[in-house]
Image: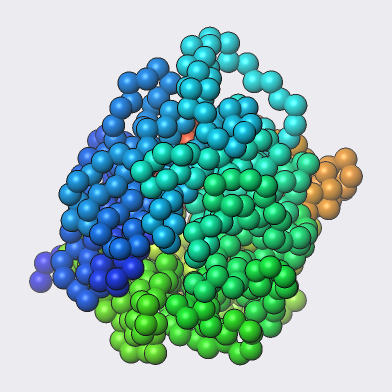
Amino acid sequence: MQAQKTFDVQALLQIQRIGDPQLSPDGKTVAFTVQTVDIEKNTKPQQIWTVGLNGGSPRQITTEGSNERPRWMPDSKRLAFISNRGDASQVWSQVWSQVWMMDPDGGNQRAITKLPTEASGVSISPDGKKMVFLSEVYPECATDANYDEACNKTHLDTDAKNKMKARVITSLLYRHWNQWQGPRRQHILSANIDGTNIHDLTPGKGQAPPFSLGGPDDYVISPDSKEVAYVANVEADPATSTNSDIFNIAIEGGESARVTTGLGADVSPLYSPDGRYIAFRSQSRAGYESDRWRLIVAERGSWRSTVLTEGLDRNVLGMTWLPDSSRLAFVLEDRGRHNLHMIAVGGGATRAIVTESSSLDDVQFTKDSRTMLYTESSGSRPAEIFRASSSGGVPIALTHLNDDFLSSYSLGKYEEISVEGAEKAKISSFVLKPPGFQEKRKYPVLFLIHGGPQGAWGEQWGYRWNPQVFANAGFVVVMPNPRGSTGYGQKFTDDINQDWGGKPYDDIMSTVEYIATQPYADADRFAAAGGSYGGYMVDWMLGHTTRFKAFVSHAGVYDLRSMAAETEETWFPLWEFKGMPWDNPDLYQKWSPSSFVQSFKTPTLVFHGELDYRVPVGQGLQLYTGLQLQKVPSKMILFPDEGHWIGKPQNSVFWYTQFTEWIKEWTAKKEK
């Protein structure tokens, strides 16, 4: 029997990443995207593939450039898509993302748009006559709701040639994630299917936020092809508000009408196939980005709404209509799984359709509602596309793109444990053991702490912080879901508010002590690592325990006071700490890791991206300064070209390599 290879970062980056499956209207073919990684070129190109709903070999149908967002024409005879190939010769153009069209076999590929401000996120109207897409335009060029190509091109030329690069800032939310606010705004445009007659559906600064609130799934065309529903935050100060609402507008432009009026976020509008309703996801509490996502249906015209999932104390992550408009299928987050449920449009009891130890997404149904399509992944296998009967039965995988490659590696399955945490709460964790695990052998243990803080580890595949890579490095990997985690009820999530280092820390340490009693755990070789809030918790642990041999803090929150004034989404500290540092100075000091720097002793590796505007790089710099002045063994690695996450392939290889080398060095078994 051939020995299994070690699943490391090089292997991780060879996986073909499947996404965005789209079932053709005739129910015969699925178009989808496959992203690969080119380490040498430091790129992640994406191509479009197709596969028959009833089986057959998947086929790649694009090869040039990077391609995404395949969307079928109503007759299933053509596919619209976004491609970045083509003319990039202009002084202001670094890429050239445009709407393209092709036959289902990949033939007759041709550009439909040639906008200087580019195009992305294309959707096709049900009658096949119109398309809607995004473009980053100059708002002053669309005062009459028409797209002015010459005006936009002139501004692009002027900005590209201007040697003065000063930023003039007059309001908050002047940067977001890893991007500074510039003179352009992402607007929704509509056009004829041949690219002519372009209208700006969100003209003017009043209807478009400085940064996109979501992606192309936050706008949708009505079944009669006459209007578009879209999401926007039109609050006077979007930096302090999570109150996005749904609007609708005629597909050729005009006045927008507000559909929702809630205090929290309303997103993901979706028309029913018969046009009678709009379904959407909604949060009720203003300013709280981690409130429970509920599924709501509103009748068009009267806009009388019904909350369908009020009795379900879980987040709705996505939904789709059944073709007859009588029911909705939705993905529910529950205890680290993303399972599929169904409910009638009028409400009532829900019915579980798929409840596996995995995560589902991209659910679609054939027109007769008998067959459903979806993607599924788990902690031990990346996403593939599946077909199943909507009434039950064994799913059939339509793609096996990674099966042969992964057969050479040993990928363990997650185990679930539960301990008693603070206030006797039940705290769940996922545990992943290394390949060739032996019960009588002692292993070093790596505890991974998730970010958010309102997030969760779950049964799904990931490319950042992939536990399989760490397990293959020889560690038992433990992923606790302490207070603040999602999927265990809203109160459990809310319990972290104003208590960042309290109950969550106790929950994690209860898990640590439980693992220490297990026969396979070497309690003298524990390490912990986390990013964002997980980095905060590592920083907090530095001042509160010497239980660990090593820490890794990635983009961690170190000083809450300076963090509150530097981060871009100001609503976050306003909610989490009920005001700014000058409002509640004692609360900020109480839960700030920087208040305990004199107790730091554990060797720590600090990662940070210099383009991180969510947790700005100063947090990492301050942490490293404190470690060095306390004479704690430490190392800092800064990425000038990365934001909150590490995305570039060569940076990712370096990150994983440095991470594993650090924890191996400090948890190495000492010879007696």
Residue 25 found in image quarter: bottom left
Q: Which residue of the protein is positioned furthest toward the top in this rendering?
A: 163
Residue 91: x and y, percent?
40, 17
Residue 130: x and y, percent?
43, 51
Quadrant the N terminus occupies: bottom left
Residue sitting at x 69%, y 76%:
307
Q: Is residue 629 visible?
A: yes
Q: Is residue 293 visible?
A: no
Residue 227: x and y, percent?
56, 56
Position of 456 compared to 662: left or right? Answer: right
Position of 421 compared to 77: left or right? Answer: right
Q: Which residue of the protein is positioned furthest toward the left in this rendering?
A: 1
Q: How many marks?
A: 0
- Between 238 and 130, the residue placed more toward the observer is 130
Position of 537 compared to 113: left or right? Answer: right
- Between 157 and 215, the residue placed more toward the observer is 157
Residue sitting at x 11%, y 67%:
2
- Please determine whether, in this image, residue 429 is positioned above or below residue 121: below
Residue 111: x and y, percent?
30, 39
Q: How is the image coloured?
A: rainbow
Quadrant the C terminus occupies: bottom left
- Between 548 and 33, the residue placed more toward the observer is 33
- Please determine whether, in this image, residue 73 is positioned above or below residue 317: above
- Please determine whether, in this image, residue 166 is positioned above or below residue 585: above
Residue sitting at x 73%, y 35%:
172
- Between 241 and 537, the residue placed more toward the observer is 241
- Please determine whether, in this image, residue 149 is positioned above or below residue 228: above
Residue 376 found in image quarter: bottom left
